[in-house]
Image (cartoon, rainbow, N blue to C red):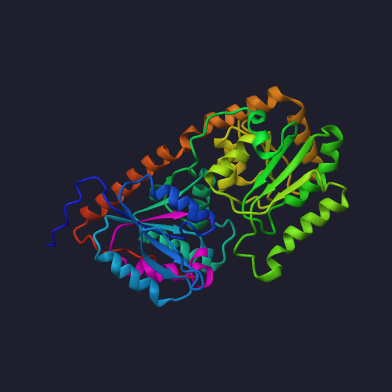
Amino acid sequence: MAVSPDRSHLISRTAFVSTYAPRRCGIATFTYDLATTVGEREIVALHPSTEPGPYPAEVRHRIRRDIQSDYAYVAHALNDCGVDVVSVQFEPGIWGGDDGSYVLDFIRALRVPMVVTLHSVFAHPTPAQRAILIELVNAAEASVVMSQAAADLLIGVYGVAAGQIDIVPYGVSDLPLIAPDTVKPRLGLQGKAVILSFGLLAPGKGLESVIEAMPAIVAAVPTARYVILGSTSPATAVGSAGEAYRAALEAQAAALGMTEQVKFVDRFVGRVELCTWLEAADVFVAPSPDLDRTVSGTLAYAMGAGKAIVSTPSALASELLADGRGRLVPASASGALATAITDLLLDPELRASMGRLAYEHSRGMVWWEVGRKYRHVFDRAARAAAERPYPHDRKLAVVVA
């Protein structure tokens, strides 16, 4: 009988496979923040061949996204480098192959216990998307999602057993509650009623609905300013075409006579500056028309800053903003957006109480708490693998499309 390695100790070393800072990518930022909470770690950085870095010292391995042979090669390297568990961050767009299928080359070669964090769970997957996710989940010792809505999809759409799923929320900075008016002068917004959306700019974010609502908002609150914070997403930035969405939004604001009332901050901001913008905001708005969304870093960050939030009723927002923690409006409904935002701007007590409820709920989302939960999942995964008679065996799903 094979002798299982002794993993009775707590996890001491974790390898994270993901895009990674300084790449301008929400998952890269998430992985950087998560990795810093779990102790000793090393990073496997996923990157396009044309963007090799530079990376910090903890990046020990690199996978060129579109070079299929890199995946098994790096998995074999991890098998031999003494890590206790591998944390795979899965979002199809950051992995090579159709629908991120090269992740399967990686996990099939891996012999270290693996935990997967699912950044997207599609409500209406293609057969290929469904097959990839099922094989990935079945190969993992544990699968982490960031909302109950995502867990429900895994169970109902993909047939995953509830016992295979851990729900750990998106991590946020541990910010104090600060009165926005004390921060606005630092950003040149003193005396303004600030509405904020942030994130990488790309079509499908629904920002045009908020711009369309601005004339009605300004008529009721003349000091209102809508700040759109963020650079164009690298996924859409192909020559001048990458800026087409931003140009369309700017043209829309100009046509409505809202050039002064809609402010574009065209850059990727670091954590400190992002927190400053959040603290200065009176209302955060999340207008995405994608109602199947089950994860949103921007929504999590706004809750962590204690903001009054107006959002479309995505699966995630309906969950996070329940019980008075925010206000939901129909997608692409500029009139409803105008009413909800105006009501909050004109009622500071309502704004403060809604923000406080969101802030209190977000205490379970601060990074030290999220990191503690992940460390528990990683340790459990390593122990479970060690208890098998043949710890390197991995059962892979056979899926018929």
Q: Quick check: 67 left or right of 358?
A: left
Residue sitting at x 57%, y 62%: 125
Position of residue 174 measured from the top left corner of the image (x, y, whole percent): 48, 35
Q: Is residue 316 above or below residue 351?
A: below
The quarter of the picture where residue 301 lies is top right
Residue 209 visible, this orientation: yes
The quarter of the picture where residue 241 lies is bottom right
Residue sitting at x 12%, y 62%: 1
The quarter of the picture where residue 393 lies is bottom left
Residue sitting at x 76%, y 40%: 225
Position of residue 168 measured from the top left corner of the image (x, y, whole percent): 44, 43
Does 314 lie within the magenta span? no
> Observer-nearest residue: 146 or 224?
224
Position of residue 217 measured from the top left corner of the image (x, y, whole percent): 82, 37
Position of residue 103 measured from the top left corner of the image (x, y, whole percent): 43, 67
What's the magenta region? 94-121
Residue 119 visible, this orientation: no
Residue sitting at x 46%, y 58%: 20
Q: Quick check: 53 left or right of 243?
A: left
